Amino acid sequence: MFDRRAVMKGLAATGVLAGCRSWSAEPPPIPAGSRAWNVEAIAYHDLEQRPGFKLTILERGGRWYLYTGCFWHRGWNILDVTDPARPQLVNFLQGPDNTFTLQVDLADNTLITSLEKGLENAPWGLDPKGPYEEGVLLWDLTDPIRPRRVGHYRTGGRGTHRNGYQGGRYMHLAAGAPGFTGNIYSIVDIQDRTRPKEVGRWWVPGQDSAPNASAPARDEMASHGFCNIDGKDVSLHGPAVIEGNRAWLPYGAPGLVVLDISDVTRPRQIARIPFSPPFHSTFGVHTVMPVPERGVAYVSSEDTSYGKGAAHFAGIVDIREPTKPTLISLFPEPIPPQGASYRSFAERPGWSGPHNTNQLQHNPAVQKQGDLFYMAHFNAGLRIYDVSHARLPREVGWFMPPDPTKRLGPMPQGPLVTQTEDVLVDRRGNIYITDKNQGLWVLRYTGPKRAPA
């Protein structure tokens, strides 16, 4: 009988899978000290001390493969999570020097990975004046463990951040480009994977105007090169989410922007709903997840101010009339666990507030959005909400990893605390989360499917 695990061990031992990791029979231990409500930890992997960032997943021939960008290291982790209680690190793709390799997405047997200039004041080995790679790498996933690089798209600028690829002919990028400040929306044709080419772009007026492109670096995440227009920070964070002929863009202070892309060479704005003010400006809209069949979009910000300044937010927008999006509710603020030394998470060290959500709805291996909504919430860990009533979202579960014991990167400033970055939920119900200074957690929700009335 074919024994894949034995074969993999043999190949690794003989060096055939150069760069690949061997399989272990026993699951790694789960660190002690986490706190949870209606969530259990089923596994932990330290990722060989290369913290993950953005996540995506592939199901192939009965096996499941998880791909992560890396925060402080140059490259991408690949794990076999067929048995979610025994995640196996099976390869690490080395990335280019002096370059951020944070973001991943996949579809149509193609993995896309972002390349981006590092932070302007990077204190951990990135040289902002040194050479770097930029743009997007395209990988063929015929062998999911050993992707084959087949293409490289370059912006000619600082590179790309949070990109989307939902299959088909086009990538949808949050791209730096010559002559612009802040990321703009770029549509790239990859019908020929070896020769990607931009076919359309859209930006907020003023991003192409040098006098308005002078926002100083205010914090650790100023690497996104925000454009300051009328006192507001403007940059497409991404990813653009495509539903039919519409592109939904999380565009910082300008808010949620909806474009008609019937003609990809000439995107046209059809709606916009701003959130700054009253909410903070820098990442005023960080993530957008439209779910047309439910008539709503889930929208949230990212706060990098360490609990200072204007409030962050996460809310639900009515999109039944896409040209007239309307905010209809806000997610409740997480409450510190009993016995905590802080009254709110804004008072706790580290970044606080929402970050990524279980967003990759185009991926057939990802759990489709139903009544449960999953949100990475920085120093509050993972939060799970019942959204069966769009005007009354309720928290129904949470998981807070123990605080890290070893600093693997320069953030957060000050004391080391958990900083939950990304969340992805596979179709089987396994929840994966990453952290700035920890490995990969695998969780399961154990609470009610709906909040009690």
Image (cartoon, rainbow, N blue to C red):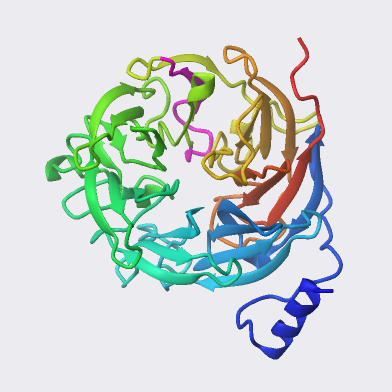
| 248 lies above or below 450 | below
Q: Residue furthest bottom?
A: 14
State the image coordinates of residue 70 (x, y, percent, origin top left): 54, 61
State the image coordinates of residue 41 (x, y, percent, origin top left): 80, 46
- Residue at the (37%, 31%) spot, across then down: 281
State the image coordinates of residue 315 (x, y, percent, origin top left): 52, 22
**Quadrant in which residue 59 is drawn:** bottom right
Is 316 part of what is drawn in magenta?
Answer: yes
Q: How many numbered discs, if any?
A: 0
- Residue at the (40%, 49%) spot, across then down: 168
Viewer-closest of 14 and 252: 14
- Residue at the (55%, 34%) spot, across then down: 354
Left or right of residue 92, residue 2 in this image: right
Left or right of residue 274, residue 90 in this image: right
| Residue 440 visible in the picture | yes
Where, quadrant-wise, is the N terminus in this rendering? bottom right
**Quadrant in which residue 132 is drawn:** bottom left
Left or right of residue 394, residue 54 in this image: left
Where, quadrant-wise, is the C terminus in this rendering? top right
Is 396 part of what is drawn in magenta?
Answer: no
- Residue at the (57%, 52%) spot, across then down: 55
Q: Residue furthest front?
A: 1
State the image coordinates of residue 361 (x, y, percent, origin top left): 54, 38
Viewer-closest of 166 and 78: 166
Q: Give the range drawn in magenta.
A: 303-320
| 240 lies above or below 151 | above
